Each structure stands twice: as structure tokens, then as C-alpha cells.
Amino acid sequence: QVQLVESGGGLVQPGGSLRLSCTTSGFMFSKYHMTWLRQAPGRGLEWVSGITPTGNTNYRDSVEGRFTISRDNAKNILYLQMDSLIPEDTGVYYCSNQASQRGQGTQVTVSS
């Protein structure tokens, strides 16, 4: 059975950092394109970043240069390093595989 479990969210001040993790099982992680999505309060789900099985990455414009997506194919874990956080980054963050399966999400709140 496919499982994706996000962790690492929390409350952080503007300018701070968080590292999200997504622990996966039940599918061939190393062969899948993976993405991070987020949903801000009152808004729809939006794509944040993606990474190919071989490590090629891309980002939405608003997080480019501040967020870094990475993966550990030996441990089946996806990461999102988030630096220089701003209040607009607040939301529930989800990891998703190329079959559009995703976890329950982890809350990120950026506030002073």
C-alpha cells in the first residue's frame, strides 16, 4: 500500500528556515518524479517544486532561490529545504508522486 508521510512543519518567524521530509513506501520511489505542493488558507492547491528520478529540479518563481528540493533514493525520502521564509509561504505542504498520490500534509506557518 502506498504511503507518503510529511513531517518537519511548524511555526517559524519571517526569515527563518524549515526542512520538510516526506517518507514514502509502497511504490518504486527511485523511479518516480516527485513534487511538493502547498495549500494556503483560503486558496487552492499549488505546485511548489518538482524533482526527477535523476535529480533534475524545478521551482515556482516565488520560491526559486529560497527553497531546495532533494531526494534520497536509498531511503525513499523526499526533502524540501525552505530558507528565507516569508508569510506568503504559510500553508499545508504535501508531497506527491507522479501518480498524484499524496500524504496528509504538514502545516507551515510563517509569522512573527
Image (spheres, rainbow, N blue to C red):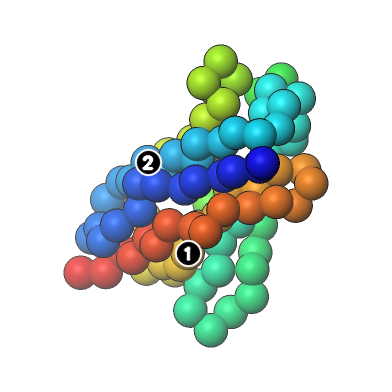
- Badge 1 crowding class, 10 Å Cα cut-off, few under 14, some 14 to 19, many 20 or more, is some
Which of the 4 quarters of the picture holds residue 108?
Answer: bottom left
Q: Secondary structure at mark 2?
A: strand
**Left or right of residue 61, residue 90 in this image:** left
Q: Amino acid at mark 1?
A: Val
Residue 61 at x, y percent in the picture: 62, 54
Residue 32 occupies which quadrant of the picture? top right
111 and 6: which is toward the camera = 6
Q: Residue furthest right?
A: 99
Report the residue that reaches farthest toward the bottom: 42
Q: Residue at x 47, y 64 (%)?
A: 92
* Quarter of image, res 70: top right
Q: Is residue 44 above or below residue 90?
A: below
Residue 96 location in percent, x, y? Answer: 65, 48
Q: Residue at x 66, y 57 (%)?
A: 47
Q: Is residue 78 shown to the viewer in this render?
A: no
Identify which residue is drawn at 60% across, 20% down.
73
In this view, the residue farthest toward the left is 112
- In primary-sequence order, the first of circles 2 and 1 is 2
Q: 105 and 49: which one is in front?
A: 105
Q: Residues within 10 Å of mark 2 (few under 14, many from 20)?
A: some
Residue at left offset 60%, top offset 56% = 37
Q: Which mark is residue 92?
A: 1
* Image location of residue 100, percent across then percent down: 75, 52
The span from disc 2 to disc 1 (Cα, nearest Å) is 14 Å
Question: Callout 1: helix, strand or loop?
Answer: strand
Q: Is residue 17 visible?
A: yes
Above or below residue 88? Residue 94 is: above
Numbered circle sitting on residue 19 = 2
